[in-house]
Image (cartoon, rainbow, N blue to C red):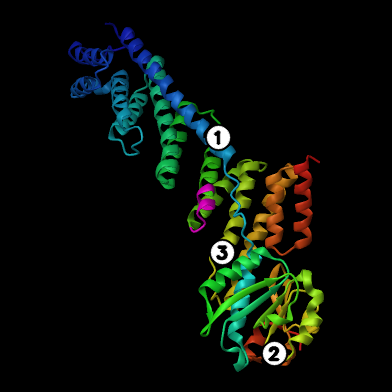
Amino acid sequence: MDRQGANAIFVGYCGKDFATEIGLARLLKYLVVIVVITSSFGFVQNFDTNAKIKAVFLYNFTRYFEWPSAKKTGNFIIHVVGKNEALMKELTKMAESKTVGNQKMEVINTPEFDPKAKPHMLFLLPDVSKSLSDATSKLKGKGALIIAENKDAAKSGAAINFVIIENKQKFEYSKNSAVKAGLKTSEDFKALAIAVD
Amino acid sequence: MLSSVSFAQYDKLERVMECIKAKDVNCAKNAVDSAFMSAEVRKDAQAWYYRAFVYFELAKKEKFNYYSAYRDTSLNSIRISNSLKPEPPVKDATNQILKKHSETYYNMCIKLLYDSLNYDRSQAAYKKYKEYYAAVDSTVDFKAKDIEYYSGVGSHFADLFNNNNAKGEFGEAGKLALMKVLELDPKNVSATFNLGIIYYNQGVNLINSMDLDTPLDKLEVIQDNSTKLFKQSLPFMSKVYQLDPKNQKALESLRQIYQALNDTEKSLEFNKKLEDAKKGN
């Protein structure tokens, strides 16, 4: 066999196999392209960050107030008025795993304010903000922390009002309203809030 | 071509060719190893090409082994063959093998990424792919290949992170790779979109993983950090929207980002645009 012939064998053999290799490379290239194009729409669906943040706020609020002795037995009732499914989901999870002192947490949700509910916390969602004055007068001195989420609510009877500042959830605090509701409060709490009085 | 090699050595190289013809690679290895005992053979560029070829064939058994000694021997043989200034046909043939090694490294870089998540090794393999391909063709422009590779890396890590947000390192690896894609191709929609998703999900993850016991001062810090991430997500998703205003995924994403940023007005605006897009308006 002359050397030219030998070369032809080598190159021919090499060439045949090379085609197979290229085939694999093309397949893998195709796979990469598929991955790029079909990359899943990876947003975390059905998770409302605002609801989780509010749940953390509400649980924190239980630490900074002292409820009247008459309300230290039975369940610790959080009454949410209005519609917010994501928040209810978070609060229900919270009630399943947390307590306030020795009291179990109970979360109830009604579309309208119900004065018979006797809550420890009453959270009036924005869609029922008009109920604030009614709730304030009917729950006065009854040991209910009234929380709202509406402009100037802390100046209109709510002890706590959620506000948005620089894209973040914060809260206004009216110590006077908390005292009128029959709650003892902590000075530390005022430092963490936007105090309105 | 083989003027410098004696007839005795020629016989040994002939034996190599016979083994190759018979597709008996072990026989070829023995023959080539034997031939290379001779100092005379080691001066022959074509003999080095044969050695490169035989060891290339052996390396096929280890095509996904980054540290294949057979491959290293083949590559070293190519280097020596080229240093001996071979005739053009031999040079072309060694280049063909070198190109195949380059392709092997490319295949390896993908397999290392997808199968074993060994990104460092994958990048090293990709670098070798480029190095050897460029040695064969110095005019090649790797920009398209870089975009393809880093898009694959970025979307793979983005998917891994989005499926398991606890794996923050995947999110970071995805971001770095996708940033490289955007350096090369600023209008790459897929990379832009995936970057927006990673930043958003990192922000969500901070809040989602927060315990209810989190004290208020720490909650403030978490909100600061998540808000920063949502704001970082925003320009990427806005860019996707600019490039494709009817892109429903971009519209849905912007709706969620603005909601996370507590910008109800903008969130509702994009919700309406999304509804319109769904209706085909």
Q: Which residue is mark 1?
A: A33
Q: Amino acid at mark 1?
A: Val
- Of A8 and A156, nearer the camera is A156
Q: Can you identify the residue that label 2 sits on?
A: A142
Which quarter of the image is occupied by the N terminus of chain B? top left
Q: Is residue B163 magenta?
A: yes
Whole-angstrom CA distance, mark 1 to mark 3, is: 32 Å
Which is more toward the observer, B199 or A59? A59
| Label 3 element class | helix
Q: CA distance from mark 2 to mark 1?
A: 65 Å
Residue B39's spot in the image, x, y percent? Answer: 21, 23
Q: Give A52 or B247, whichever is nearer the viewer.
A: A52
Q: CA distance from mark 2 to mark 3?
A: 34 Å
Task: Tell me if residue A177 comes above or below residue B32 in the rendering.
Answer: below
Whether B190 is drawn above or below B39: the answer is below
Q: Which x, y percent locates residue A16? A: 39, 16
Q: Which residues are magenta?
A: B159-166
Give the dominant element type of the magenta stretch: helix, strand or loop.
Answer: helix
Q: Nearer the viewer, mark 1 or mark 3?
A: 3
Q: Residue at x 69, y 65 (%)?
A: A84
Residue B273 screen position, x and y as percent:
78, 49
Residue that extends furthest to the front in the rendered view of this protein: A116
Q: Counting other residues with Cα less than 10 Å from the Cα at mark 3, is it few (<14), some (14-19), or many (20 or more)?
A: some
Camera-near label (2 vs 1) is 2
At 80% across and 84% down in the image, what residue appears?
A: A155
* Residue B281 vertical position relative to residue B47 in the rendered view, above or below: below
Secondary structure beneath label 1: helix
The residue to which callout 3 is attached is: B208
Visible residue check, residue B227: no
